[in-house]
Image (cartoon, rainbow, N blue to C red):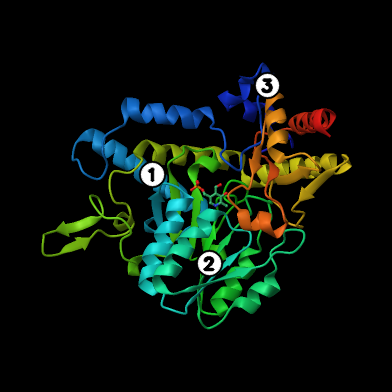
């Protein structure tokens, strides 16, 4: 959405109450969206509204409030289906977040399908959440993990990926966008090559879904996961999309209430999708508010969001490149709005601490992506990650903060 051809940044910023907060008497400049994004009033209000006027447990009661809550939760599932362009709402499983979604697939699909000597392909770009669950299942099944390298710009090397595919490759689990570097992985090509090889693909969409339109049907993705809290929605709720045929064949991941059809001590039968994978009482208010977050993002539209964030990325890259002693890490051709860098001779944590005194919130550390850090021989970077409400003035404040760091420590 643009108004007279311009991105309505003032109106958008007005939708996020926290952006008017002061930090140490300075305006909050929030550049840590890759870790978690702030919430618009509609999402915040929806949570109160659910508890004030539409709350009970779901899928259980015949009473009015239970029906209201169940209908709202299932309406949110429809919104997610539409958001990802999934063919069937039964393919949308609510989980706690991307981490739980990946663990679900690694455990449930992995136990049923992986045998000793089978191969799992990951890439150097993965977040620990898309490494460790596969290591655990590899240990349990005897499967082998192979890793796609990246180039000096942090780009995914498609040719090397192709070389790793063998007749034993069962699954490829790859990030859509790198949280540490911002690299956008050519996922359509990855899926094509994997499918030609007879392998399935899980995409970790944590940093993809907040920045660009995702069409799982067009991509032909087998699994896609994302977390609500990075998409301007609540924490504690996320989504696993899976193709129906795959999910139907997979055994339950967790068990308990909600996920059963009939229980006796002799034998239990399971509920249909998606409930087979939704054991226990879900995060009802969170699911409903995730639907509101999706409404919010779709109201602006990814064409406008992408264009705005690309301008911020380009501007911040230019400004930091002009500075002395700044090394930008991750300069792949296709990037989402994430800028990782270091000031020479200054520890990233010191950079982050001084920026914090200027009201600028950035992430410092390994970003739960230690293999990426190892690839560049680093232990940590400073990461500015932009969202739909950030501005060029905030980039200027970041640069001014970095100049201050250099005056103090450089
Ligand atoms: C690429 C990527 N994958 C997975 C995760 C884990 O997400 P969550 O902690 O919401 O489960 C993150 C979070 O930073 C991420 O950036």
Name the element at disc 3: strand
Q: Residues within 10 Å of mark 3 (few under 14, many from 20)?
A: some
Residue plotted at (30% across, 42% down): 70
Question: Residue 114 is drawn in which quadrant?
Answer: bottom left
Contact between labelled residues 3 and 2, with CB atoms less than 8 Å apart: no
On the question of residue 51 being in view, the answer is: yes
Residue 170 in percent (x, y) is at 48, 75
Q: Residues within 10 Å of mark 1 (few under 14, many from 20)?
A: some
> Does label 1 or label 3 sit earlier along the sequence?
3
Residue 75, disc: 1
Contact between labelled residues 2 and 1, with CB atoms less than 8 Å apart: no
Name the element at disc 1: helix
Name the outermost residue toward the bottom. Answer: 167
Is 236 placed left or right of 396 in the picture? left
Residue 45 in percent (x, y) is at 45, 27
Q: Is residue 391 above or below residue 121?
A: above
Question: Residue 177 is drawn in which quadrant?
Answer: bottom right
Q: Residues within 10 Å of mark 2 (few under 14, many from 20)?
A: some
Tell me the mark number nearer the camera, choosing from 1 and 3: 3
Is 205 placed left or right of 354 in the picture? left
Residue plotted at (46% across, 60% down): 133
Measured Cα–Cα span from mark 1 to mark 3: 37 Å
> Does label 2 or label 3 sit earlier along the sequence?
3
Nearer the observer, 139 or 178: 139
Q: Which residue lies under the disc numbered 2? A: 220
Q: Which residue lies under the disc numbered 3? A: 27
């Amino acid at each position: 959405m643009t108004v007279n051809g311009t991105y309505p940044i003032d109106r958008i910023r007005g939708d996020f109450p926290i952006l008017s907060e002061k930090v140490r008497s300075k305006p909050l400049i929030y550049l840590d969206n890759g870790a978690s994004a702030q919430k618009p009033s509609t999402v915040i209000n929806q949570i109160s509204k659910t508890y004030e006027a539409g709350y009970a447990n779901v899928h259980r009661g015949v009473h009015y409030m239970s029906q209201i809550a169940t209908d709202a939760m299932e309406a949110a599932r429809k919104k997610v289906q539409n958001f990802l362009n999934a063919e069937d709402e039964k393919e949308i499983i609510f989980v706690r977040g991307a981490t739980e979604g990946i663990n679900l697939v690694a455990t449930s699909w992995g136990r049923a399908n992986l045998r000793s000597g089978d191969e799992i392909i990951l890439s150097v770009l993965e977040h620990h959440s898309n490494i460790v669950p596969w290591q655990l299942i590899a240990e349990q099944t005897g499967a082998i993990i192979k890793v796609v390298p990246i180039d000096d710009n942090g780009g995914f090397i498609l040719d090397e990926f192709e070389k790793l595919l063998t007749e034993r490759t069962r699954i490829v689990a790859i990030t859509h966008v790198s949280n540490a570097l911002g690299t956008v992985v050519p996922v359509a090509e990855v899926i094509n090559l994997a499918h030609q090889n007879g392998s399935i693909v899980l995409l970790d969409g944590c940093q993809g879904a907040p920045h660009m339109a995702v069409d799982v049907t067009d991509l032909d993705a087998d699994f896609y996961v994302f977390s609500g809290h990075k998409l301007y929605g609540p924490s504690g709720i996320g989504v696993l999309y899976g193709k129906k045929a795959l999910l139907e064949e997979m055994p339950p991941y967790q068990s308990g209430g909600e996920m059963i059809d009939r229980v006796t001590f002799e034998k239990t039968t399971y509920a249909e999708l998606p409930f087979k994978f939704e054991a226990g009482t879900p995060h009802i208010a969170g699911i409903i508010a995730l639907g509101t977050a999706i409404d919010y993002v779709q109201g602006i539209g990814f064409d406008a969001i992408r264009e705005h964030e690309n301008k911020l990325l380009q501007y911040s890259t230019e400004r930091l490149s002009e500075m002395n002693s700044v090394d930008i890490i991750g300069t792949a051709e296709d990037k989402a709005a994430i800028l990782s860098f270091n000031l020479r001779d200054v520890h990233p944590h010191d950079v982050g601490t001084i920026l914090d005194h200027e009201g600028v919130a950035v992430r410092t550390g390994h970003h739960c992506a230690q293999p990426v850090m190892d690839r560049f021989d680093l232990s940590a970077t400073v990461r500015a990650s932009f969202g739909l409400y950030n501005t060029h003035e905030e980039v200027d404040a970041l640069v001014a903060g970095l100049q201050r760091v250099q005056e103090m420590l450089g």
